[in-house]
Amino acid sequence: MQLFHNPPFRYDRSLSHPPHVVIEQDSTRWPGYNLGRRSASVGFKIMKIVRDVESMKGVLRPFAGRRVGLVPTMGALHSGHLSLVHEMKKHADVVVLSIFVNPLQFSPGEDYEKYPRCEEEDCKKCADAGVDVVYIPSVEGMYPDGFSTGVDVGPMARELCGASRHNFINGIMVVLIKLVMQTNAHCMILGEKDYQMLCLTRKLFRDLNIGVDVLQGDTVRSPEGLALSSRHKYLNGAEIAKAGFLYKFLLEVGKNLSDAPDDQQEIITRGKLRLEQEGFKVDYLEVRDNNTLERIQTFSRPARVFLAVNLGCCRLIDNILLA
Ligand SMILES: Nc1ncnc2c1ncn2[C@@H]1O[C@H](COP(=O)(O)OP(=O)(O)OP(=O)(O)O)[C@@H](O)[C@H]1O
Ligand SMILES: CC(C)(CO)[C@@H](O)C(=O)[O-]
Ligand code: BAL
């Protein structure tokens, strides 16, 4: 599929695979979009865009022995994603950012088709942030005919987001295994905003002895506190302003729980009512153990408050750690 109709890129003919597979951004035609800002002595001077599963490993061959850091995303990049890139640059010699809207993690009726796709803009942001390789595999490349393998990380995949999004967690686990294998990543970074995914990915890698470090990136928020999300493209200005309420709400719930830990049930019931009154449709508001994600009654171990709501046609999630 040709995604850039008049691509401001040139083919990299130094690579052994067909030129249509790997293209390089042309820094002479796009001044400012080479990787001039990078300080590291390793990595590419010109960002590479790889669309082919087979080519991915070849692209990194010159960096054998170097630490490869993977930043998996579904694209429509925002400052949250870019903060993960900046953090990863501290831990890896070569940074690969993947853009793949993974059909496996969506269930029928969810927003797979309409999920925002804006690759050209994303590639510019990546080049500016100093990404070495943008990996944009196709659905056919990732899941060729006959693909049938799945993983199940256990009951926790069916709680929190997994209770309403049945394919969500296990679909992510499959794609993350594939992405780390395809990129030969030594480490990967996931955002705290998707804390259930982060925890269960760590569990998966532990359970299957996959020796890839999973780093945690801080949640980047708007000045009003709204955790940035690609799905904000579904919201209008008034809805964005309304969504800013969620973080203040979480902080308030957190304070109430710290002040009256024995009143958890009442605080949560009242909280859900408040969210509905503010115009949100509540999927869940829950307090869970920070490490196991189990429900907790007492606060003897670190805990986290999680929420998921719908506003218009947009699903929003957030969470905070209870001190
Ligand atoms: N506001 C944010 N701050 C930091 N990291 C984030 C933020 N939002 C998403 N991420 C992280 O970026 C990575 C890629 O996520 P993804 O591409 O699904 O973006 P997203 O904004 O979470 O999309 P959506 O909310 O629409 O599902 C994940 O590890 C995710 O946790
Ligand atoms: C990790 C991910 C890119 C896998 O599709 C995405 O689902 C996410 O960040 O939630
Ligand atoms: N970051 C979450 C990806 C999803 O909602 O499918």
Image: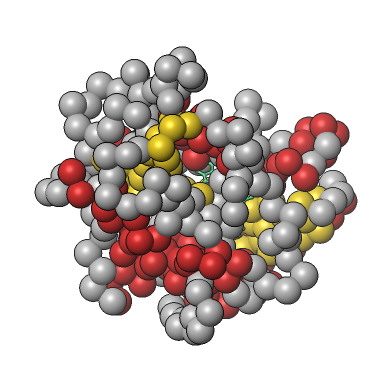
The image position of residue 46, as x and y in percent, is 34, 29
Left or right of residue 93: residue 230? right
Query: In the drawing, does residue 22 fall left or right of residue 106?
Result: left
**Snapshot colouring:** secondary structure
Q: Is residue 279 above or below residue 29?
A: below
Q: Is residue 131 visible?
A: no
12 over 177 or under it: above or below: above
Which residue is at the front of the view, 26 or 92? 26
Q: In the image shown, does 69 or 248 lie closer to the viewer? A: 69
Q: Give the position of the N terminus as an image quadrant.
A: bottom right
Instruction: Residue at 28%, 56% (x, y): give it.
Output: 57
Residue at 60% x, 67% y is 103
Query: Would you place residue 208 above or below residue 197 in this image?
Result: below
Image label count: 0
- Would you place residue 32 above or below residue 201 in this image? above
Report the side of 210 relative to 175 (left or right).
left
Instruction: Give the camera-side residue of 46 and 188.
Output: 46
Q: Position of residue 305 (x, y in %)?
A: 57, 56
Residue 144 in sight: yes
* Residue shown at 27% from the left, 50% from the top: 16
User: Residue most toward the left?
Assistant: 65
Depth check: give the residue in front, 319 or 209.
209
Q: What residue lies at 49% left-to-right and 20% top-to-bottom?
A: 30
Q: Position of residue 163 (x, y in %)?
A: 64, 74
Quadrant of residue 165 in the image?
bottom right
